[in-house]
Amino acid sequence: MEPIAHDQEVAFDFPPLMKVYKDGRVERIVGIDVIPPCLDLKTNVESRDVVISPESDISARLYIPKITNQNQKLPLLVYFHGGGFCVETPFSSNYHNYANSVASQAQAVVVSVNYRRAPEHPIPIAHEDSWAAVKWVASHLDGNGPEDWLNLHANLEKVFFAGDSAGANISHHMAIRVGTEKLKGIKLQGIVLLHPFFWGVEPVGSESAELEQRARADQLWRFACPTTTGSDDPIMNPAKDKNLGSLGCGRVLIFVAEEDTLRSRGWYYKELLEKSEWDGVVEIFETKGENHVFHLINPSCENAVALLNHVASFINQN
């Protein structure tokens, strides 16, 4: 059989993430490696994969640190990976290694969600898949869920959502849904937003001088969500979301990086929360001299270690 001839004409090029060809073929460039679940000898964290919805192809990778007491209940972190809603998975080396580190440092059970990605599955499918995963976690109330690690060792009274970039956007929206839909089965204590991917038509902060970066962010958003009305879509701009004050947790931790185009959006999000009807506590931490998701790219650097320690402290704060 002769090999299939593919159209090599590019319809969408978004370096260094991906290319989409005019015949519809998607070529992802980053986050395509797959690390199998394992016992990580460096952190002593064990991982395994679970299927949440075979019909919708939603899955997750679970992580658990070494258990010394079989009756021990640990905080539960539900993590949503970044990648512009288009690339990466929980199984790539960056996210697998980071989840091991968080589970170890915070002594927490981690559920790293594998949602479907654009362009094959445009926004809001990633958000709907993520909500299905949150409801799956909540099904473990009273130890009656399908996954023993969660039944035996996850404290559903101490649940956190976290994510980086697009995953931080998803984490925010999952907390909104917890607040508006009153999900039974979990008590969401807080969310951690690492370099969150929010946007808007009107520039904020330093964005006025970043015309090329603004165009790039707009392009990526419209690519991931072809039906959007634009960058003031409530999915992308919290200032346009009437439910912002219903955020379903009491604490928010935001991380921004000094050299990141999205830095101003993180600060703006803090301002919006403080002006909203939400009555929780929001904290923001800016890393000097670093760029977007530096902690995944160089996890052993001093700033990445400090960030990890801050996340762990937030999860274990009484």
Image (cartoon, grey):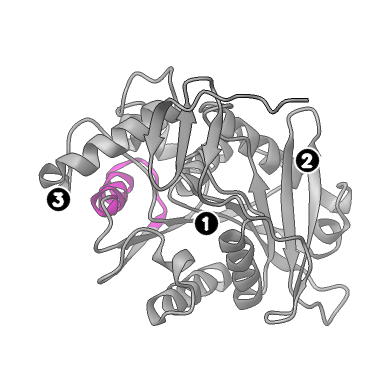
Quadrant occupied by the C terminus: bottom right
Residue sitting at 28 percent across and 38 percent down? 216
Q: Hey, what amino acid is under mark 1?
A: Gly
Disc 3 from disc 2: Cα separation? 41 Å
The answer to which of 262 and 311 lies nearer the viewer is 262
Q: Secondary structure at mark 2?
A: strand
Q: Hey, what amino acid is under mark 2?
A: Ile
Q: Hey, what amino acid is under mark 3?
A: Ser
Which of pointers 3 and 2 lies earlier in the amino acid sequence?
2
Disc number placed over residue 190 in the picture, else none: 1
Res. 131 image quadrant: top right
Disc number placed over residue 206 in the picture, else none: 3
| Residue that numbered label 2 is attached to | 52
Disc number placed over residue 99 in the picture, else none: none
Quadrant occupied by the N terminus: top right
Q: Position of residue 265 (x, y in %)?
A: 28, 47
The answer to which of 71 and 21 lies nearer the viewer is 21
Disc 2 from disc 1: Cα separation? 23 Å
Q: Is residue 266 magenta?
A: yes
Q: Is residue 301 left or right of residue 5?
A: left
Disc 3 from disc 1: Cα separation? 28 Å
Q: Is residue 48 left or right of residue 303?
A: right
Q: Which residues are magenta?
A: 262-281
Which of pointers 3 and 1 lies earlier in the amino acid sequence?
1
Q: Secondary structure at mark 3?
A: helix
Q: Secondary structure at mark 1?
A: strand
Residue projecting furthest to the left: 209
